[in-house]
């Protein structure tokens, strides 16, 4: 029997939150890369150097490859201390102005109820762990990036991009560790439907009409956060 077919108890819950567009108002990686380049203006020219990767993405639609290529182009070769300093400042600014208050309230409710909170995001481990810690998550799952032997950032992805079927795989892996817990998933986009089909209750944040139609057969709630 698959672990997700086994009987599950009503509480405490195993709760998954997406990050971009679910907790935060917009994509976080683009702001992270642009903010770093603005702090180091000569690196702004590296966006031009990334045009071949952007063109390749239009052909293969490989978001993981594009993500790693952009990080490598914009931030590659930077010392870990410099990366850590920027990540700390970026997360502090993001938490001040870029997070839905309703998301904070939902996270707090689950934490106060004793639920196991997991931040599961396709974005990278340069700053996701700090966001998870600041918001009180029990653990996080995100996409790791590669470092060089000399301690500087490579930027290429070190493992699978935590998106689409990889999110589903990660959810199943975690459910196996927490057999018997009801599953709740908060997300906001079409690719998230793959793993939301496995949860007992899905919550879609600010869904489009197309997403609402696609999710209509799920045990889903629609929330509109501002």
Image (cartoon, grey):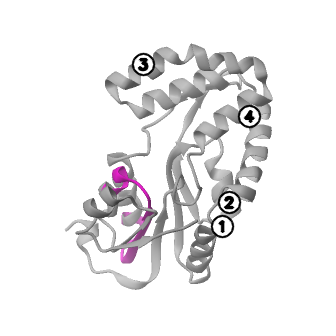
Callout 1 touching callout 2 (CB < 8 Å): yes
Work out whether residue 181 or residue 19 is closer to the camera in this orientation and state it. Answer: 19
Q: Which comes sooner in the sequence, label 4 or label 3?
A: 3
Work out whether residue 197 or residue 225 is closer to the camera in this orientation and state it. Answer: 225
Residue receiving disc 2: 133
> Whole-percent x and y of residue 177?
41, 65
> Whole-percent x and y of residue 37?
72, 27
- Whole-angstrom CA distance, mark 3 to mark 2, is 36 Å
Mark 4: secondary structure = helix
**Furthest residue toward left:** 1
- Whole-angstrom CA distance, mark 2 to mark 4, is 18 Å
Does 189 appear above or below 6?
above
Q: Which comes sooner in the sequence, label 3 or label 2?
A: 3
Tell me the tag on residue 83.
4
Callout 4 touching callout 3 (CB < 8 Å): no
Q: Residue at x 77, y 46 (%)?
A: 88
Task: Please state the extent of the stretch shown in magenta in the rendering.
Answer: 176-193
Q: Quadrant of the N terminus?
A: bottom left
Point out the frontmost of discs 1 and 3.
3
Q: Residues within 10 Å of mark 1 (few under 14, many from 20)?
A: some
Residue receiving disc 1: 136
């Amino acid at each position: 029997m698959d672990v997700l077919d086994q009987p599950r108890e009503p509480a405490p819950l195993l709760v998954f939150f997406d990050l971009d567009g679910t907790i935060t108002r917009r994509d976080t990686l683009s702001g992270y890369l642009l903010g770093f380049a603005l702090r180091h203006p000569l690196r702004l020219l590296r966006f031009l150097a990334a045009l071949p990767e952007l063109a390749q993405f239009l052909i293969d639609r490989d978001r993981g490859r594009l993500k790693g290529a952009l990080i490598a182009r914009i931030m590659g070769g930077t010392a870990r201390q410099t990366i850590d300093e920027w990540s700390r400042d970026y997360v502090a600014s993001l938490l001040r102005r870029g997070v839905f208050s309703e998301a904070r309230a939902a996270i707090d409710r689950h934490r106060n109820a004793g639920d196991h909170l997991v931040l599961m995001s396709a974005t990278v481990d340069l700053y996701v762990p700090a966001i998870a810690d600041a918001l009180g998550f029990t653990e996080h799952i995100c996409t790791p990036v590669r470092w060089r032997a000399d301690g500087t950032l490579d930027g290429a992805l070190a493992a699978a991009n935590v998106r689409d079927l990889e999110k589903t795989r990660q959810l199943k892996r975690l459910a196996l560790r927490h057999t018997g817990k009801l599953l709740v998933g908060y997300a906001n986009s079409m690719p998230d439907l793959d793993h939301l089909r496995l949860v007992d209750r899905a919550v879609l944040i600010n869904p489009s009409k197309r997403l609402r139609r696609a999710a209509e057969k799920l045990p889903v709630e629609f929330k509109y956060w501002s």
